[in-house]
Structure formats: structure tokens, C-alpha cells
């Protein structure tokens, strides 16, 4: 299995409250994209404010294998989510790694 972690940082065009639209869209991906074993998403509520650096939304997806992870990016449902980010993203951090059996 493979883990896919993403942290989203928004720019000044981002409207507060929009994160719930984004979280709902992310959660819906689990039923739309083959190979997703588990998916969680949410608004960053860390109390470690010195470490937040403006990243307000997180995503964790567990995939069956590396092929499923590779197929995720170009999938139409994922592409539709990415379109929701147009114009409001400042930065995105992505970490992918295999989960030891």
C-alpha cells in the first residue's frame, strides 16, 4: 500500500469558509477513484501556531498500490477537484511513501 499526504496553503484570494467545500469534494473522491483504501481530509486545527506556516487544509489517502497512486492524479474526479483550487493556491506540499507490509 501507499500513503499520499498533502498540505494546502491558500493565497490572499482564498475566501474563509471555502475549506468546507474543498473537504467535501476531497471526501467524495474515495467513492469515485479506484484503488483508494482510505481517505481523510480536514481543516488544520493545530495549536502549534509556530509550525503552521499558513497550511490550512490536509489530506491523507491510502492506496492499494503504487499503480493506484499513479492513476489518481490524472483521474477526472481528481482533476475536477484541482479545478476548485485554481487561483487560490499559494503552495502545496505532497509526500508519498510505501507502507511496509
Image (cartoon, helix red, strand yellow):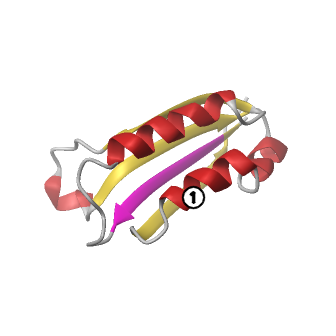
In the displayed structure, would residue 40 be above or below residue 3? Answer: above
Indicate the quadrant containing the N terminus: top left, top right, bottom left or bottom right. Answer: top right
Q: Percent from the top left, x then y, of residue 84? A: 50, 57
In the displayed structure, would residue 48 be above or below residue 38? Answer: below
Q: Could you say which is closer to the camera, residue 25 or residue 52?
A: 25
Judge left or right: residue 98 versus residue 51.
right
Residue sitting at 37 percent across and 38 percent down? 42
Q: Secondary structure at mark 1?
A: helix
Residue sitting at 42 percent across and 40 percent down? 23
Q: Could you say which is closer to the camera, residue 90 or residue 14?
A: 14
Q: Which residue is mark 1?
A: 82
Judge left or right: residue 7 versus residue 31.
left
By secondary structure, the bulk of the magenta-drawn segment is best described as strand
**Which residue sits furthest right?**
67
Q: Percent from the top left, x then y, of residue 91? A: 42, 70
Is residue 45 a member of the stretch shown in magenta?
no
Residue sitting at 35 percent across and 40 percent down? 20
Q: Could you say which is closer to the camera, residue 81 or residue 56?
A: 81
Within-10-Å neighbours for mark 1: few <14, some 14–19, many 20+: some
Is residue 9 a member of the stretch shown in magenta?
yes
Judge left or right: residue 101 versus residue 61.
right
Residue sitting at 23 percent across and 41 percent down? 45
Indicate the quadrant containing the C terminus: top left, top right, bottom left or bottom right. Answer: top right
* Res 79 → quadrant: bottom right
Magenta span: 3-10
Q: Percent from the top left, x then y, of residue 70? A: 78, 52
In the displayed structure, would residue 13 be above or below residue 74? Answer: below
Amino acid at each position: 500500500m501507499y500513503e499520499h499526504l498533502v498540505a494546502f496553503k491558500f493565497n490572499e484570494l482564498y475566501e474563509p469558509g471555502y475549506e468546507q467545500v474543498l473537504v467535501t469534494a476531497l471526501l467524495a473522491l474515495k467513492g469515485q477513484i479506484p484503488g483508494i483504501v482510505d481517505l481523510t481530509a480536514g481543516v488544520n486545527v493545530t495549536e502549534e501556531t509556530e509550525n503552521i506556516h499558513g497550511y490550512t487544509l490536509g489530506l491523507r489517502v491510502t492506496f492499494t498500490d503504487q499503480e493506484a497512486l499513479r492513476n489518481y492524479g490524472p483521474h477526472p474526479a481528481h482533476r475536477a477537484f484541482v479545478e476548485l483550487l485554481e487561483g487560490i493556491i499559494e503552495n502545496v506540499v505532497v509526500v508519498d511513501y510505501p507502507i511496509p507490509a
